[in-house]
């Protein structure tokens, strides 16, 4: 039987590369697309020799062409870390708007099922905790994070419109903070920031007083949730994340313990509009996908720390963003 073909955008990034691995393992033909603006070909170079893997160096905010049939599309292209999207705000808005429009057009012409990577950031600085999918959010459209949050909200609206008006098969996953190997050590997100600082013998920079919370999901759990959502018949947005909520200060203490660093936490100014709390309500994922996270933070952090430790020293010491 012919293999199913899947297009994965943002394939050279952290999540996209793990999705490539999963769909190769499931014996799909994988078409990986990326413009490498925040990604790294090293994340997928092990797949290049495979006959069921192809790479297209392309910016999806420009017209997207793929020859032949495409059964599924996963749209993961977008800067994802605050320092990335603050540095390239216009590209972030474009990939969430022009990019999704191109991919929806492609999905329509190929009759593909399209899944988009949305985010817990659609809830902004939430006033309810945990956040269920029905919560509409509390987003500042013109604040610094608005370029990301509003792009993702537009992307959801556009996807739902194609679903409703064109009958396109669509899926929307709202991803909460996810971590694991292949994150960029200098991407500014809290986990690589803290581990990088510990490895370099620097103090850990906690923003604000560290009382803000996040809930960290290990990448393998996320990939499993996305896999189940894609093959479910559920077209409304679905939260996927780990509900184990922790303050950033406690998280810093865990990293200090894990790495054995002698350094301490130092407190810096809290970025504008930094959400005070974040925790997914995963009732729907449990019920509809029979999914819940399996990897606890202690285990996931250990694997991730080993990955970062194994990087070449010059990469660990390279701090430029
Ligand atoms: P990442 O930066 O590692 O990967 C994003 C990839 O998209 C990169 O390889 C980048 O080069 C590529 N890209 C960006 N703009 C592009 C464009 N115009 N054309 C083609 N490729 C482009 O980030 P990630 O953490 O892997 O995030 C992947 C997706 O998941 C993003 O859409 C992000 O918004 C979403 N997400 C991630 C998290 C998380 O915790 N990691 C949480 C919520 C949502
Ligand atoms: N954070 C921090 N120190 C850092 C980087 C981030 O205290 O060096 C904080 C940040 O202000 C936020 C939390 O950690 O409250 C998570 O930040 P991250 O950028 O990882 O993700 P997001 O804010 O998008 O959830």
Image (tube, grey):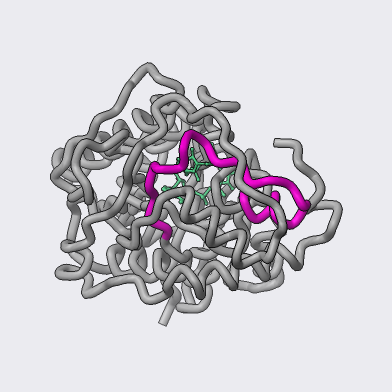
Residue numbers of the magenta segment? 194-216
Q: Residue at x 47, y 65 (%)?
A: 219
Question: Residue placed farthest to the top in the image?
Answer: 142
Q: Residue at x 37, y 47 (%)?
A: 213
Residue 230 is left or right of residue 180, and the answer is left
Instruction: Give the answer, above or below, for where 109 lies relative to 180.
Output: above
Q: Residue at x 46, y 37 (%)?
A: 209
- 103 or 304: which is nearer to us? 304
The answer to whether residue 23 of the structure is visible from this angle is no
The percent coordinates of residue 273 (x first, y second) are: 39, 27
The percent coordinates of residue 198 (x first, y second) are: 70, 55
- 118 or 270: which is nearer to us? 270
Residue 29 is left or right of residue 263, and the answer is left
Q: Residue at x 62, y 56 (%)?
A: 55
The percent coordinates of residue 319 (x first, y second) are: 76, 41
- 32 or 63: which is nearer to us? 32
Q: Is residue 205 magenta?
A: yes
The answer to whether residue 37 of the structure is visible from this angle is yes
When asked about the image quadrant of residue 321, the answer is top right
Instruction: Give the answer, above or below, for where 272 lies relative to 14.
Output: above
Q: Please count the marks in the image.
A: 0
**The N terminus lies in which quarter of the figure?**
bottom left
Q: Is residue 297 magenta?
A: no
Instruction: Give the answer, above or below, for where 118 lies relative to 261.
Output: above
Question: Residue placed farthest to the bottom in the image?
Answer: 1
Residue 203 is left or right of residue 162, and the answer is right
- 46 or 320: which is nearer to us? 320
The percent coordinates of residue 235 (x first, y second) are: 19, 54
């Amino acid at each position: 039987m012919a293999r199913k073909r899947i297009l994965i955008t943002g394939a050279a990034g952290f999540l996209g590369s793990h999705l490539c691995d999963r769909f190769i393992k499931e014996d799909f033909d994988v078409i990986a697309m990326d413009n490498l603006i925040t990604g790294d070909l090293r994340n997928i170079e092990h797949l290049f020799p495979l006959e069921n893997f192809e790479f297209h160096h392309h910016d999806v905010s420009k017209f997207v062409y793929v020859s032949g049939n495409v059964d599924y599309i996963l749209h993961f292209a977008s800067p994802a870390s605050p320092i990335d999207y603050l540095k390239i705000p216009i590209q972030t808005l474009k990939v969430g708007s022009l990019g999704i429009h191109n991919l929806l057009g492609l999905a329509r012409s190929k009759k593909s099922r399209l899944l988009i990577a949305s985010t817990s950031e659609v809830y902004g600085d939430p006033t309810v905790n945990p956040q269920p999918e029905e919560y509409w959010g509390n987003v500042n459209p013109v604040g610094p994070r608005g370029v990301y949050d509003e792009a993702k909200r537009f992307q959801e609206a556009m996807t739902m419109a194609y679903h409703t008006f064109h009958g396109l098969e669509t899926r929307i996953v709202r991803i909460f903070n996810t971590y694991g190997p292949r994150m960029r050590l200098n991407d500014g997100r809290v986990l690589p920031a803290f581990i990088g600082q510990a490895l370099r013998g620097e103090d850990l920079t906690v923003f604000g007083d560290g009382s803000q919370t996040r809930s960290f999901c290990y990448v393998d759990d996320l990939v499993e949730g996305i896999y189940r959502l894609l093959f479910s018949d559920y077209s409304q947005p679905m939260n996927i994340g780990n509900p184990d909520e922790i303050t950033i200060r406690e998280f810093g203490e865990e990293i200090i313990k894990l790495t054995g660093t002698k350094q301490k936490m130092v407190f810096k100014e809290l970025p504008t509009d930094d959400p005070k709390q974040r925790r997914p309500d995963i009732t729907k994922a449990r019920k509809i996908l029979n999914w819940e996270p399996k990897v606890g933070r202690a285990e996931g952090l250990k694997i991730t720390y080993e990955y970062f430790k194994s990087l070449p020293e010059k990469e660990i010491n390279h701090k430029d963003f």
